[in-house]
Image (cartoon, coloured by chain):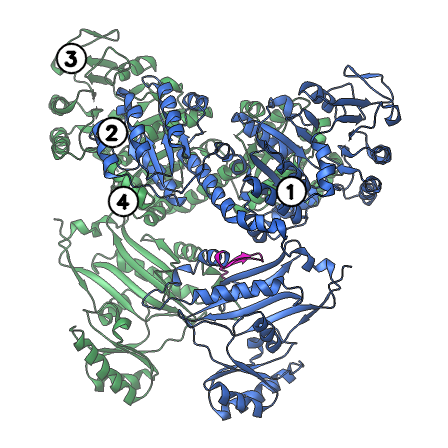
Chain colours: A blue, B green
Amino acid sequence: MTTSRDHSLRVLLDPQSIAIIGASDNPDKIGGRPIRYLSQFGYRGRILPINPHRNETQNLRSYPDLDALPEVPEVAIIAVAGDAAVKAVAECAEKGVRAAVVMSSGFGETNDVDSRNKELAMVAAARAHGMRVVGPNSQGLANFGNGAILSFSTMFLETTPADGPVGIIGQSGAMSVVPYGLLRQRGIGVRYTHATGNDADVTTLELAAAVAEDPALKVLLLYLEGIPDPEHLEEAARIAARRNLPVIALKSGRTPAGQRAARSHTGALANEDRVVDAFFERCGIWRARDVQDMVHAVELHLKGWRPKGRRLVAISNSGAVCVLTADAASMAGMPLATLSEETRKDLGQILPSFATTANPVDITAALLTNSGLFSEILPVIARDPAADAFLIGVPVAGKGYDVDAFARDAAAFARETGKPLVTAIPQPGVAARFLAHGLSVYPTESEAIAALNQYLSHVERMQAARPRLLAEAEQPRVRGNHGAAEYSATERLLNEADSLALGTRFGIRCAPYRLCRTPEDAVQALRELDGPVAVKGCSADIAHKSELGIVRLGVSTEGEVRAAFAEIERRIAEADAQFDGVIVARMFKGRHEFLIGAHIDPVFGPVVVVGDGGKYVEALPDTQLLLPPFTADDVRLALSRLRIAPLFDGVRGEPPLDIPALVDAVLAVGGMMASREANVVSADFNPVIVGAAGQGVAAVDALITVRDGQASRN
Amino acid sequence: MTTSRDHSLRVLLDPQSIAIIGASDNPDKIGGRPIRYLSQFGYRGRILPINPHRNETQNLRSYPDLDALPEVPEVAIIAVAGDAAVKAVAECAEKGVRAAVVMSSGFGETNDVDSRNKELAMVAAARAHGMRVVGPNSQGLANFGNGAILSFSTMFLETTPADGPVGIIGQSGAMSVVPYGLLRQRGIGVRYTHATGNDADVTTLELAAAVAEDPALKVLLLYLEGIPDPEHLEEAARIAARRNLPVIALKSGRTPAGQRAARSHTGALANEDRVVDAFFERCGIWRARDVQDMVHAVELHLKGWRPKGRRLVAISNSGAVCVLTADAASMAGMPLATLSEETRKDLGQILPSFATTANPVDITAALLTNSGLFSEILPVIARDPAADAFLIGVPVAGKGYDVDAFARDAAAFARETGKPLVTAIPQPGVAARFLAHGLSVYPTESEAIAALNQYLSHVERMQAARPRLLAEAEQPRVRGNHGAAEYSATERLLNEADSLALGTRFGIRCAPYRLCRTPEDAVQALRELDGPVAVKGCSADIAHKSELGIVRLGVSTEGEVRAAFAEIERRIAEADAQFDGVIVARMFKGRHEFLIGAHIDPVFGPVVVVGDGGKYVEALPDTQLLLPPFTADDVRLALSRLRIAPLFDGVRGEPPLDIPALVDAVLAVGGMMASREANVVSADFNPVIVGAAGQGVAAVDALITVRDGQASRN
């Protein structure tokens, strides 16, 4: 696990000395602000401003050039423009500077070839001497743990920093500091706010892996527009898994419009969005839908809870909040816990008769006249083991209420139970008092439930992903080495017989069949297969058989077989396609048609797709994705998310489906895709007919494309 | 349209004099707070405290009892407990008080029969004299337009009221003031904050209809846990439609857990949630999913925009915000407008070369060095007619930026274009300055897009509903008079032949058929129908034929028909069911099976359901609801929302479906359900086979239940 990254990037996080090339005496210029921040936020290393025109910069001794420095700085900030930046990078590299943060813009982010070439030259010069480069066009890195603020962001002037357990990394300047601002508004400390810019050398995800190793970090936030280097994200995920570090990523470019915008912003190539979803899940990473989603559960992860389940108990002084919470929790898949009879009896002795002792517990407006109700019921509820998590809703309080006592009691209750607890408090004044007691406060119950649900779901996802990630730390998964760019690209469609044969080799069941070259072979096959058969034309030139009319089903007599053979051979000849023979296959009588497909994603490698089969797979898609290698549990989970999942156990008197056999088939396709020897580029088993429980499955059509030649890198 | 409501409820909104029975000198007691509020918030009528123990209450002359008052008060607040409250209501009614607001609790909201009976007695006493009662268990009514604050809510102490164009009405005290608080936090004035309590007499919705007539009102918010009286909501909707008043309703009890909680909170009976959705849409009412949703688009409705479409232009100084906005807008069905070549050329002359002149317009961080960029590009964008709405995102600003100029320029741009504009600004300091210039500010782009999308969608919904609502003002729709409680309830299942015949009478097409009593009839039918035919047992005792095995398809010979007849007759006899004959029906060859169903909702009246047919209608439902009467446009819209809608135009070389014929069939079912003469309680046409375009449809099975007897009220 020691890589050059470890060494070179750690310098960026904890530099002993920092030169600023293009240092400015004006603390609001790009070349001035890092000096200001380094001084202001407690950096203890050496600050070495470089400016040929000054001896002193912001009260620090400054130097005319690199040669004049008393030492070789570990890191240099480059804040000069254009060619001067390229030159500065080259000089730093030659002098032995370990890493540079290039803030200068006008390079790869433009449409200008010349500017793009300058960026390439800059990186080449650095690499020649083993120097790493962040940027160009980087807002910079900020580490409030040691004051190493190599950033010119305005945000740290606007919202006071405080070191804390959160790291934020992205290419975008804005999206590294917006979550910072939102978290700081909630009183949460942030250690890292890194904006890497063009990622010409060091990438966001490479830096993420380095940051993930900081033992002080408790939550890692990522903003991504593209994922060109998933191996770094996997590495970060493995490091995070070892440490139980939650990683929350906002990956934009979900839609074609967003992808176009991302392309002009960071040049990000579009990732297939569902593959990103599957990849994140596999890595235990939560995918935030938006910026709020990125930050709103962070504080819950910081509490150190160990949630055991999703059953909620809700408590409020408003019946309406009870109703709204019950709705929100139900819709989030958080069932309301059933309180024990004893709990309800005890509550009944405390609460007025018109209050509700069932869950949600409605204290009613009686709280106004008896503030003690709250402190009396909480211990009763704490004793009941039914709850996994709590919501306390206080929609209205203020004059006449002992708000501080509520907050104190709620905090004591949270400590006593040690279980996840969120509060929903719309009044800012009341919210402030609950916050002061260390509680997590959201304005409304729906926001509180959304955050709690995200937190619980993320913990579940982390737990599910952890064993695999830890195992893969030993042996990273097969992935991008199947990628298109790495092969001498001769792709070849296999005919159905070869496709079925290849599938069979990897354990994908199909109905017994014979490839017949002559009508006599076909008649013989009909006899051997004993029963009505399907007769299908076989040609590597034909991807879509039914459109050519070369499939005959339910053929049961010798005459029919001969007629079918002749007709199919004629049609294939008319289509000017190669005739590889006719497949005679036993009809498989099943219950439901599925599809199993697979392809090589250019970034993420093999992807297996499983879903509802039949005629309308494109028009009415119902599919789930899996990234090999995966387990039977993964396949079962994916299948359970299909729209058609309610059919698995049998409905309307139908028998249950043979889902175990389907799971085996999906695993077999996963194995085939992970095999370098098979060299499969894409596979489409459709339909895969699934029989009643115990009857197995049969792939009754298959279409595989392989890539010929050796797996040689271009 | 003049109802007793009009008269009696207006007194509650604008009382000339108010007696407070149970007046307290302590302004924080329930009987004291209304007096405090009436004095504090500018009420100009007479305040008449009643307390047998005092001559003066909160510096006002007070009276020992009703008789001692110098006048008969228009309205009385009842703030005494239990029996005293019942007595006070009776006395008020006898004296000629026009309406009472009963704050006392411990009545119908309890599980206690005695307490519930007291509530009934209270209302009966009031009704005997034509007095209206709000409550009991009401937090009260508040009208900040005239200072008539008949409420004891704590909230008006916590968050300063300001009269404004918003009304909020609900049974719940908390949910009438929580939206108040959230709106006031955003600087929006609220006129009405009404919490009606147990709705024993005056209901939330009746009051909503009265409030909707206030010409100063620009948005009406409702919190509902049940809708027992949809006629009042329809009346409110009609009044709102006349005035183009947006109505936003948060109806909780969406889930079984929420419904249970609502039942113990307000005693609300569960409404079928999808029917509520359909009813709201029909009424032009926006259904908020949660409290945030209830308030976040209010300010957009107050701007007086007249939106023409959904094409968005986004502008930001952050490329990441551009990407996130493009994603959010796309997912909300708001396409990014295509800027003209001229606009892009003009933008290109202003913006730096690495900025993006396409939409989203990325000004880039160059804004930091040139604050003028913003003011220069806005007029260019304003000239382009492509945009229907705008989002301006300023994720980071502060020192070095001329934030006030940005806000001023954005406000001028908004005025100039007159088009909807939202801003996304996470920094509170920057947000405050945009707010100060009258702009709508949300913390993030996703929240801004969500609010804008809700606003635009609601306006579309209002426009779609308006013509019908205005027409129905003349002739209210048929509804609850079909309701179960109103009939002498003898329900009777029709056999298939009678069901098909009844459907046919209302214009529902079915395949030609004959009801045959003898095998000879059946043979004759086969000849006439020019087979193949379906042969089906007919019995009013049998709802599910296929499970009894009394359906034969594809029968084409005389022998087959006779065999089928005999077998079916035998099976029906074995099932101990009445044998009504055998239906011989021509097979209809169609393309896709739909279902059309209908039932009488106990609250909302007839409901028609249309959707995907076939075996799995329960397991994999794909249906849409319609409330009669509805138009062909309504049906087409409902069909377009089905999951299977992509199949309508034909996929994979299939012909398009005969959707116009399906629309006619749905209209026919709607007509049948609206007919009092047919007296249909439920109908199930499944499958309705839809043929290729021009081939029509055929209901090939039907099951109708009718209610016999006259439509006499119990």
Q: Name the residue under label 3.
A: B69
Q: Name the residue under label 2.
A: B9
Whole-Å distance between the Cαs marked 3 and 1?
69 Å
Closest to the observer: A151 or A634?
A634
Pointer 3 indicates a residue of which chain? Answer: B
Q: Which amino acid does label 2 sit on?
A: Leu
Percent from the top left, x then y, of residue A591? 41, 71
Q: Is residue A415 left or right of residue A705?
A: left
Labels 2, 4: one chain: yes
Numbered range of the magenta stretch = A620-633
Mark 2 and 3 residues: CB-CB less than 8 Å, in contact? Answer: no
Mark 4 and 3 residues: CB-CB less than 8 Å, in contact? Answer: no
Q: Is residue B543 left or right of residue B649?
A: left
Q: Of the two numbered discs 3 and 1 on the same chain, state the one appearing first in sequence.
A: 3
Pointer 4 indicates a residue of which chain? Answer: B
- Asked if B185 appears above or below A537 in the picture, the reply is above
Q: Of the two numbered discs 2 and 3 on the same chain, state the one appearing first in sequence.
A: 2
Q: Is mark 4 on a helix, strand or loop?
A: loop
Q: Name the residue under label 4.
A: B270
Residue shown at the point (76%, 16%) measured from the top left: A58
- Viewer-nearest of discs 4 and 1: 4
Q: What residue type is labelled 3?
A: Leu
Quadrant of the rendered image containing residue B358: top right
